[in-house]
Amino acid sequence: MKLRRRARLFRFFRNVRTHTPFFGLVFLLFGLWLLFAGALYLAERNAPDAQLQSYGEALYWGVAAFSTAGIADTPASGLAQLIGAVWIVLGSMLFFGAIVATVTAYFMRPLHRPAQQIIDTIEYNLEQLEDLSLEELELLRETTDELIEHVERTRAAASTSRESGT
């Protein structure tokens, strides 16, 4: 059982890597973070009241600023403030965009995958029945009813098309 769960977890990460933009967006975010931190440090290093005295402090500022932690010092120079503002907007959009895009792509994936993978997913979820609440079980029942109705409509349509010879 443990091996089966591990295999499913591995398959989950493989599916995220293959079917979602998550890792690409994370690498882009990481690269831009390094780039903007460098630009911020270069713009700030000769400012008279500069708070950022090293590249490491600029890296920290980049994470603190776009994560909305509110603990980042304001850059002293106007150019550094502009660079910081662009980073906050761009970094936040990429970070939260990566999360939204990944979740959306992952859950839209069943619409684009072979039937066996859908069956595997259903089997996995059925193994988790003991962990579901009453509300979740009711939703599962409704979904199953809709699935059965869909199968019946598909069979009827196929039967009709065979009978009419098309």
Image (spheres, rainbow, N blue to C red):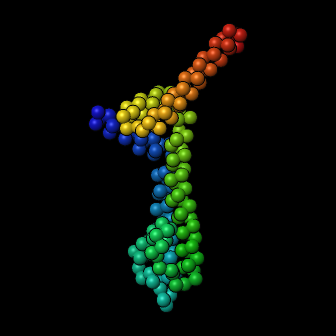
Image spot of residue 29 (x, y percent): 49, 61
Residue at the spot x=46%, y=28% of the render? 119
Image spot of residue 12 (x, y percent): 41, 41
108 relative to 158, above or below: below
Picture mark count: 0
Residue at the spot x=49%, y=90% of the render? 48
Q: Quadrant of the N terminus?
A: top left
The foreground one among 61 and 124 is: 124
- Which quadrant of the view contains residue 157? top right
Residue at the spot x=41%, y=44% of the render? 13
Q: Quadrant of the C terminus?
A: top right
Image spot of residue 141 (x, y percent): 50, 29
Q: Is residue 124 visible?
A: no
Image spot of residue 70 (x, y percent): 48, 73
161 relative to 20, above or below: above
Residue at the spot x=50%, y=65% of the render? 32
